[in-house]
Image (cartoon, rainbow, N blue to C red):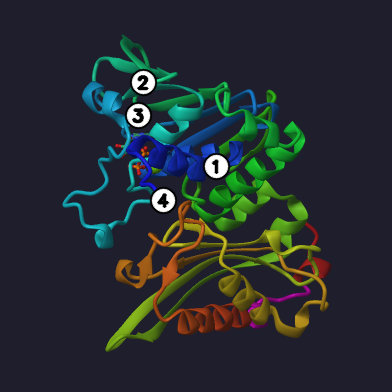
Amino acid sequence: MRRLDRETVDRIAAGEVVTRPARVVVELVENALDAGAERIEVEVTAGGTERIRVVDDGRGMRRADAERAVERHTTTKLPDGDLRAVETLGFRGEALASIADVATLTLTTNDGGPRATRVRAADGDVTVEATGRGQGTTVEVTDLFHNRPARRESMAAPATEFERISDRVAAYALLRPEVAVTLTHDGRRTFATPGSGSFADAALAVYDREVARESTTLDAGASVPMGDGEASVGIRGLLAYPSITRASADHVRVAVNGRPVAMPGLRRAIARGYGSLLPGDRHPVAALSVSLPARAVDPNVHPTKERVAIRAADAVEGAVEDAVADALSTADLRRSADVAM
Ligand code: ADP
Ligand code: MG
């Protein structure tokens, strides 16, 4: 048995984070959100296999930070190195370095000063130059997996890779309606949310008029027992009426403290809230944003943070189920039949 050297450990970790184009998109979108962006534009070519570009109007970086951002384990998000206090989506300082390991990464950024900085990382070389750009950051990723033949081979057809990207970007667009999110594939606009803060506006942009019309929004609060005390749970979002169903649970979307997560327990809680209103083999369309005190959530349990650990998960799931059931029982489910829009 032998101990892996540092470089190998790093490569394994990089491979874990960057497995396919959609992972790259998710990491870049989360960085944009962490930078306080109000607008995020995601543009991809050939399902992200040729090019991925994410443009934001967030706080940007000054030159020294931009240079360091592409190095491993460099982050500006851990003020005192305390993992428990993290409120940002990122914190490991790994994403940009991992992407630069397996692709050509160009980052153009301006923190509001007179000049912008362009950092290009490819094949282990980093070049830095001054350039022009308004405040915000653009990250462009090309040649994905050029040095990882196995990963390149295992990428699906562009249409399939784009479906995954679209599903992930839609989750951020629906669950963070205060941010204007646009998605463009091969020069064609897939959707653009207005960033109005309204879950219904975001649903109208991502889905269609039918889903937006046949749905209700909810904004509920509950208190659940946690440890010695109580924790308050905020539950906001949109529930399509049971007249709209899907064959898979992919359209039941949940965010925990602003991070879209794939958590079967929360999905099932939403389905239980719909109860018998849904035909047995069908799933609803829903986007719910669950807010918990930071101490109740540990995001450090999964390499891509797709799952988080929630303290008192049963009680939180119960609160979600009740909020969904209440919202559907007070909504006028016949509204769509009576009112033409
Ligand atoms: P992490 O998000 O875990 O900190 P990343 O590798 O994703 O690690 O990013 C490294 C650092 O680069 C971040 O901590 C942040 O300071 C900076 N950064 C990355 N993307 C952006 C962006 N879009 N806007 C502003 N700063 C960014
Ligand atoms: Mg990050």
In contact (CB < 8 Å): disc 4 and disc 1: no
Q: Which residue is mark 2?
A: 134
Alpha-carbon distance for marks 4 and 2? Answer: 53 Å
- Disc 2 vs disc 1: which is toward the camera? 1
Closer to the chain start, of discs 1 and 3, is: 1
Q: Secondary structure at mark 1?
A: helix
Q: Secondary structure at mark 2?
A: loop
Q: Secondary structure at mark 4?
A: loop
**Pointer 2 residue Cβ closer than 8 Å to ligand 1:** no
Instruction: Determine whether, in the image, residue 248 is placed left or right of residue 114.
Output: right
Residue at point 77% right, 56% down? Answer: 210
**Pointer 3 residue Cβ closer than 8 Å to ligand 1:** yes
Residue at point 25% right, 60% down? Answer: 85
- Disc 4 vs disc 1: which is toward the camera? 4
Disc 1 residue crowd, few under 14, some 14–19, many 20+, Cα 10 Å: some
Q: Which residue is mark 4?
A: 1
Closer to the chain start, of discs 2 and 1, is: 1
Question: Which amino acid type is shown beneath numbered disc 3?
Answer: Val
Residue at point 62% right, 82% down? Answer: 325
Of 240 and 81, nearer the camera is 81
Question: Which amino acid type is shown beneath numbered disc 4?
Answer: Met
